[in-house]
Image (cartoon, grey):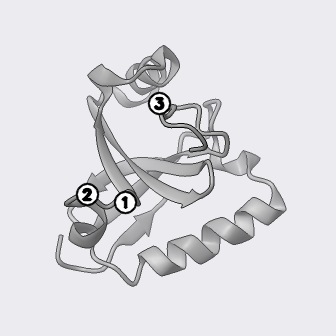
Amino acid sequence: MNQPLRFRFDQVDVGGPWCLTSIDQPHHADLLLKMRDYESMTAREIFHGNDPRGIRYDMAECPNPEPIRRLTEAFGGRDSICRLRINGRRRLYGFLTGNDFSIVWWDPEHVIWPSTKKHT
């Protein structure tokens, strides 16, 4: 957790509704720049404390049943997932193991785990 965050693509959900391959070109550039920024930080800096950039979620509390169903279907029912804020409503979801963030989903509309706060 004290090493720089490292991105992995070994868990990308290519068959699901939030596949990273559906990203449009302007969002792709934003994503790559933000990933570059995150790689200059440690996983501890991003996912510990009250930093809104990175959050760990217990999927039992997810307000949207579709991601829970997809995790069960594609990943054997993993019970937690992490989220990185990219820009505006755009989010990147994945599994965090140490300092490795294995990308799973791209959520450009903030629908996987919708916020209860306005304008997020």
Q: Which mark is residue 50?
A: 2
Determine whether, in the image, residue 110 is placed left or right of residue 22: left
Q: Position of residue 63 (x, y in %)?
A: 43, 20
Which residue is rendered at x = 64% and y = 41% of the image? Answer: 19
Q: Quadrant of the N terminus?
A: bottom left
Amino acid type at mark 3:
Thr
Q: Name the secondary structure under disc 3.
A: loop
Instruction: Please give the residue where the numbered disc 1 appears in the rendered image.
Output: 101
Q: Does 9 appear above or below 12?
A: below
Report the mark closest to the observer, 1 or 2: 2
Measured Cα–Cα span from mark 3 to mark 1: 25 Å
Q: Residues within 10 Å of mark 1 (few under 14, many from 20)?
A: many
Determine whether, in the image, residue 51 is placed left or right of residue 31: left
Which residue is rendered at x = 42% and y = 78% of the image? Answer: 39
Which residue is rendered at x = 61% and y = 43% of the image? Answer: 119
Q: Residues within 10 Å of mark 2 (few under 14, many from 20)?
A: few
Instruction: Please give the residue where the numbered disc 3 appears in the rendered image.
Output: 116
Q: Position of residue 69 (x, y in %)?
A: 45, 17
Measured Cα–Cα span from mark 1 to mark 2: 19 Å
Q: Quadrant of residue 30?
A: bottom right
Mark 3 vs mark 2: which is more N-terminal?
2
Mark 1 vs mark 2: which is more N-terminal?
2
Q: Residues within 10 Å of mark 3 (few under 14, many from 20)?
A: few
Mark 3 vs mark 1: which is more N-terminal?
1
Q: Name the secondary structure under disc 1.
A: strand
Q: Does 20 appear above or below 49?
A: above
Q: Does 73 appear above or below 8?
A: above
Q: Position of residue 90 (x, y in %)?
A: 61, 51
Amino acid type at mark 2:
Asn
Report the mark closest to the observer, 3 or 1: 3
Q: Name the secondary structure under disc 2.
A: loop
Q: Quadrant of the C terminus?
A: top right
